[in-house]
Amino acid sequence: MDLRRVTLPAALFGIVLGLSGLGNDWRVAARLWGAPAWLGEAVMLVAGLVWLALMALYLQKWLQRGDEARAELAHPIQCCFIALVPVSTMLMGNALLPHQREGATLLLVVGIVAALGFGVWRYGGTWKGGRSDAATTPVLYLPTVAANFVAAIGLGSFGWPEVGQLFFGAGLLAWLAIESVLLHRLLMGEEMPVALRPTMGIQLAPPSVGLLAYVSVTQGPPDLMAHMLLGYALLQVLLLGRLLRWIVQLPLSAYWGFSFGLTAVAAATLRLVERGGSELLLGLGLVLFVIANVVVIGLSLATLSALFAGRLFPTVPAAPAAAPAAGGR
């Protein structure tokens, strides 16, 4: 593969979210069940290497093919995936935290500032109107809901829960507002085309990541709010399972949008068990943990297969050979 011709869609940063989410699951499993701690750190290391590679390719895209990068930024759907760049940076801060706090803090702060700036710019622009129902998909959650919830998770992990609660509130209320718009489009609009159906996996993320954010910025045993968020996350799992045959029409590597919600609800449920949750939550957490592992491993194998087959990254055509000069040999 000629990396000079690779053009990176920002949506591929969803791979980092899924891998780091699974690494977090294993970190909680190590505390709760005595699972090998190195497994979680190994998955986090893989997530970090993938993040570095994607960041390098994304920077190359802006430097060498700025017109493509600007076109993605202006696209009504693809633009929202750009939020995954700072969101994944925040998650890398969480991954690094147990090993090097100063570097982890830098990653978290840079990610929060970039995510907040992009979210205000991109989501604020939608308030001008003119958006079609066809462009309304669950990717709308990424710049505001996902970014704020992940910021809350990071701030809670770093010991700043009061600031994290501000971001949790922003993410929660943005989620409720956007969800009503999305459900109106899903219920009343045209059937979503096959090419956009992988975005349906993001529908699981708000209650799941929101639950993990809530756990990260609060203390004490599971309360009503935690159970409410978990219940709604489980409902989303069932609804997506009901629609799975309708959704999955493209190669499996396209469905990383499912991974972060699944890994987040597994980690959050196990953390509720750590905080005194019932045997029901323990059993539920184990089931979700297994499902998250199966899904992320399956997506990883499918993505590696697509990478080696040259199908993962779009490529730009090679420049045509220069015509020989007149009279030349």
Image (tube, rainbow, N blue to C red):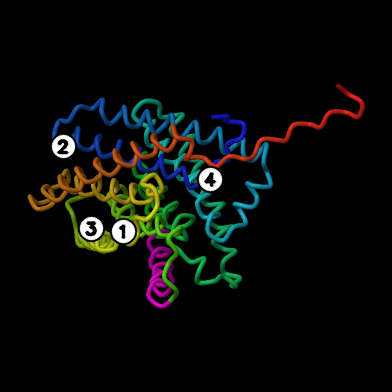
Q: Are marks 4 and 3 in contact (CB under 8 Å)?
A: no
Secondary element at image label 2: helix
Question: Which residue occupies the foreground of this view, 5 or 267?
Answer: 5
Q: Do the residues labelled 1 and 3 touch (CB within 8 Å)?
A: yes
Which residue is disc 4 drawn over? 9
Q: Do the residues labelled 2 and 1 touch (CB within 8 Å)?
A: no
The local crowd at label 3, few if under 14, some if 14 to 19, many if 20 or more residues have their Cα within 10 Å, is many
* In this rendering, position of residue 198 left or right of residue 76: left
Q: Residue at x 21, y 62 (%)?
A: 231
Question: Which residue occupies the foreground of this view, 276 or 83?
Answer: 83
Q: Considering only order in the chain, which callout, 3 or 4, is on the residue closer to the N terminus?
A: 4
The local crowd at label 2, few if under 14, some if 14 to 19, many if 20 or more residues have their Cα within 10 Å, is some
What is the three-letter code of the residue carrying label 2? Leu
Which residue is disc 1 drawn over? 207
Whole-angstrom CA distance, mark 4 to mark 3, is 32 Å
Main SS type for the magenta part? helix
Q: Considering only order in the chain, which callout, 1 or 2, is on the residue closer to the N terminus?
A: 2
Q: Where is residue 10 in the image (x, y as percent from the top left)?
A: 52, 46
Secondary element at image label 4: loop
Which residue is disc 3 drawn over? 230
What is the three-letter code of the residue carrying label 3? Leu
Q: Is residue 182 magenta?
A: yes
Q: Is residue 43 magenta?
A: no
Q: Considering only order in the chain, which callout, 3 or 1, is on the residue closer to the N terminus?
A: 1
Q: Considering only order in the chain, which callout, 4 or 2, is on the residue closer to the N terminus?
A: 4
Q: Position of residue 88 (x, y in %)?
A: 45, 41
Whole-angstrom CA distance, mark 2 to mark 3, is 19 Å
